[in-house]
Amino acid sequence: MLDLQAELQPNTILEDDPTSPVCKWGDKEWREFGYQSTKWRLSQFVHGE
């Protein structure tokens, strides 16, 4: 269950957090993330969602 009372820190950058898996990402992984994110956004637009 999601704790809706948790305090969020929106300015925290995941790649700067040593406990985050993306902390270890290199250029290859960030390119793939950008590619997949773009594909997802385009698919949402094309399907009108």
Image (spheres, rainbow, N blue to C red):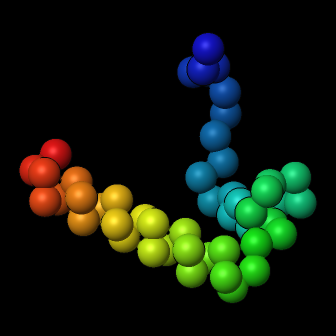
Give residue 15's position: percent from left, percent from top.
Answer: 74, 67
Give the residue furthest to the top. 1
Toward the viewer: 36 or 18? Answer: 36
- Quarter residue 5 falls in: top right
Q: Is residue 12 left or right of residue 42?
A: right
- Quarter residue 41 falls in: bottom left
- Quarter residue 11 falls in: bottom right
Give residue 21's position: percent from left, percent from top.
Answer: 79, 56
* Relative vertical location of residue 27 with respect to residue 20 in this rendering, above or below: below
Give residue 16's position: percent from left, percent from top.
Answer: 80, 67
For the point 75% across and 80% down, the residue is 26
For the point 22% across and 54% down, the residue is 44
Q: Is residue 16 visible to us here?
A: no
Give the residue furthest to the right. 18
Q: Is residue 21 visible to us here?
A: yes
Name the quadrant of the N terminus.
top right
For the point 45% across and 74% down, the residue is 35
* Relative vertical location of residue 29 with respect to residue 13 in this rendering, above or below: below
For the point 13% across and 59% down, the residue is 46
Toward the viewer: 26 or 23? Answer: 26
Toward the viewer: 21 or 16? Answer: 21
Name the quadrant of the C terminus.
top left
Q: Is residue 46 left or right of residue 16?
A: left
